[in-house]
Image (spheres, coloured by chain):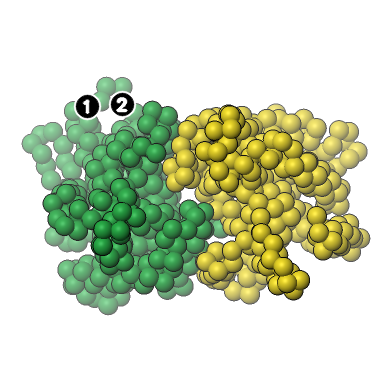
Chain colours: A yellow, B green
Amino acid sequence: MSRFLVIGIVVAACLVLLVPLAGSQYLTTHVTRILVYAIFAVSLDLLVGFCGLVSLGHAAFFGIAAYATALLADKVGVTNVLISLPFSILCATGTALVIGLLTLRTAGIYFIMATLALAEMLYFLVHDNDFFGGSDGILVLSRFYLGSTSIDVSDPVIRYCVVVTVTVAVLVGLAFLVRSPFGRTLQGIKSNERRMRALGYNIARYKLACFVIGGALAGLAGHLYLLLTSLADPSILDWIHSAQVLMMVILGGLGTLVGPMVGAFVFVELIDQMSVLTEHWKLAVGIVVVVATLFGRGGIAGVAGRTRAWGVGAKRPIT
Amino acid sequence: MENVGSERVDLLSARSHAISYRAVAVMEISTFLIQVLNGIQFGMLLFLIASGLTLTFGVMGIINLAHGAFFMIGAYLVFQFTRHWGWPLPLAFSSAVAAVVVIGSVVERSVLAPLVGRDHLDQVLVTYGLILIFDELAVVFWGKDVQPAAIPSLLRGSLQFGDIFVYPVYRLALTVAGLLCALGLYLLVAKTRLGMIVRAGSYDRGMVSALGINVDPVFALVFGLGAALAALAGILAAPILSVSPGMGDKIIIIAFVVVVIGGIGSIKGAFVGALLVGLLDSFGKVLFPSVSSLLIYALMAFILVWRPSGLFGKAT
C-alpha cells in the first residue's frame, strides 16, 4: 500500500469521525447515505472488479434485504437490529444463491442480461403484490433499536456510528479476503478463466461463492439503507438502481477497495449538487456518465494512479 | 437517488387495459382467440425492438441499453408532428422514422463506434448514460406528463368476427404491420448480400473483416435499420401505451429477455422469442393475474438453464 493511500485513508477517517461533531443533522444523514452506498458499491466491485462478473442486477440483493427488514418491522413488529440484520442478510444471501445458480451457467453478455432480467422479476414481484406494499412500498413508522431499547438506531448520530463501524469492518474484511488464497483465485479467474480451470480450480464454485458473498454484502447495505430511510419501495429494486451502483464502481475504479467508495461519494454528490442546480440534472449526470466511461479508463483511482505515475516518472500497471 | 426511475408509467399494466379479462374457470373460445391475438400483437411489437437489439449485438458486438430511446423518440416525434404541427399521418410517420435513423446514426458514429471491441461493461454504462440523456431531453421538450396518442381515424372501431368476438381494428393492423416487418427482415437477412454479411458478421466479425468487407458502413446500416424498427414500434404502440419519458426503459428489458431467449444475434430467435413472450404475457394476464409479470422472466430462467445460449444462439 502506497504512502499516499495511507495518508488519504487516515485523513478521510478523521473527517468521517468529525462529522457528527459538526452538529448538522443533514450532514450526518448525508454522510451516512454515502457510506451505505459505499458498502453497496464495494460489494458489487467484489463481483465485477475482482471476479469479472458484470452483474446488472445487484440492486436485487440490496432491495430484498431492505424489504425483508421493512416487512419484519411492519408485519411482525421486530425492530431489533440484532434480529432483522441477520434475517435480511440471510434473505439476500438466499436470493443471491438462487440467482447465482441460475445465471452463472451463462457467461458474458448473457450473464449481464440474465442478472438484469431476474432482478427485474423481483421488481415486478414487489410492485404487483399488495403484501409488499405495491408501488408505494412499505414505510416503517416505528424506530429501530440495537439489542436493548436504550440504543436507538433511528437516532442520526447513533445510526451514523453504527454505519461507520460496519463500513470499516466491511473494508477490513474485504482487504483480507482479496489477499487470501480465495481472493487471489477470484482475480485469477478474472484475468484468465481458462488457465485457472486448467490449473484444476473449480471455477463454477468460486464464482458462485463470490456472487453470494457480494449479494450478502449488498444485503447488508440494503439493511442499513432501510434504517436510514425507513422506506422500502420498488425503485430500489429497479435495474436503474443497479446501473447506478455499477456507475459508482466504474467512476471510482474497478478492482480496488477504496475506488468504489470514492465513486459512491462522487456519484451521490454529483446527483445531489446537480439536482440543486437544475431540474434537468439527469441530463448532466448522463453526460458525465458517457464522458467518464469513454475517456476515464480505470476510474478516479486509475486517473490518480496515472497522474502519480507521470509525476514519479515510472509507469505502474493499474489494477 | 432512489427516485431516479420512479416517475415511470408502468407499461405492462397500462398495456392492455382495453382488453383485459379476469381469470375464468373455463376459458371460452372467444377469450382464447382474443388472447392469442393480443399475444401475437405484443410479440410483434417486441420483435420490432428485439430485432434491432439482436442485430446490433450480432454485427457490432455492442449491447445497447439505449435502444429503447429510439422507441420513445419515434412516438414523441409523431406526437409532435401531428398534434402540434398538424402534419398528415403518412408524412409524420415517415419523417419520424427518418429523424430517428439520423439520430441513431449520429449516436452510432459518435458514441457507439468507439465502443466496438471494448468491454461489455463500458458499453452498458455508456448506453445507460444515453438513456438518462434521452429521457431527460424528452422531459425538456415535452414535459413529464403522459401524452395521449390518437388512433388514426381510418383504423378506429372494431371488427366483428362472426358471432364469436369483437377485436379493435387498430390492434389487428398493428399485428399485421409487425408480421410484415418480420417477413421483410427475414427476406433481407436470409436472401440478400447485406443479409449474408450480417449473418457472417454475427458468426465471426473478425473473419468478415479479414475477407475484405468494409464493416463500418455495414455497422452504420444495421444500426440505422434497428433504430428505424424501434421507432416504428414506438409509433405503432403509442396509441396503446401513451407517450411518456422513459416509456422505452421497461419495454427494452422485455426486449432483452426476448433476445436472450432467442439467442443473441439470431433474427429467427428474436422472432420465436418475441412470440413466446407475447403469448405467455397475454395468457398469463388471464390465467395467473397476480404473477403474470413474473412469468416471462421465469421462462427466461428456465430456457437459460436448459440452453445457456438461448434457443438459436451459437454455443459458447
Q: Chain of mark 2?
A: B
Identified at 25% across, 47% down, the residue is B267
- Please report contact status of discs 1 and 2: CB closer than 8 Å, yes or no: yes
Residue located beneath label 1 in the image: B28
Q: Which residue is at the front of the view, A69 or B58?
A: B58
Identified at 81% across, 59% down, the residue is A2
Please state the horizontal and vertical placement of residue A149, each as a whole percent of the image. Answer: 87, 36
Identified at 70% across, 44% down, the residue is A221
> Helix, strand or loop at disc 1?
loop
Q: Is residue B234 visible?
A: no
Query: Crowdedness of circle 1 by 10 Å Cα count: few (<14), some, many (20+)?
Result: few
The quadrant in which the C terminus of chain A is found is bottom right
> Helix, strand or loop at disc 2?
loop
From this viewpoint, which residue is outermost toward the left? Answer: B162
Mark 2: amino acid: Val
Residue located beneath label 2 in the image: B24
Q: Locate residue B180 relative to residue A148 in the image: left or right.
A: left
Q: Do pointers 1 and 2 mark residues of a single chain?
A: yes
Mark 1: amino acid: Glu
Q: Relative to residue B13, is residue B311 depicted above or below?
A: above
Q: Is residue A81 visible?
A: yes
Identified at 82% across, 47% down, the residue is A168
Q: How many marks?
A: 2
The quadrant in which the N terminus of chain A is found is bottom right
Q: Relative to residue A250, is residue B40 depicted above or below?
A: above
Please state the horizontal and vertical placement of residue A281, each as a whole percent of the image. Answer: 57, 69
Please state the horizontal and vertical placement of residue A72, each as a whole percent of the image. Answer: 69, 32
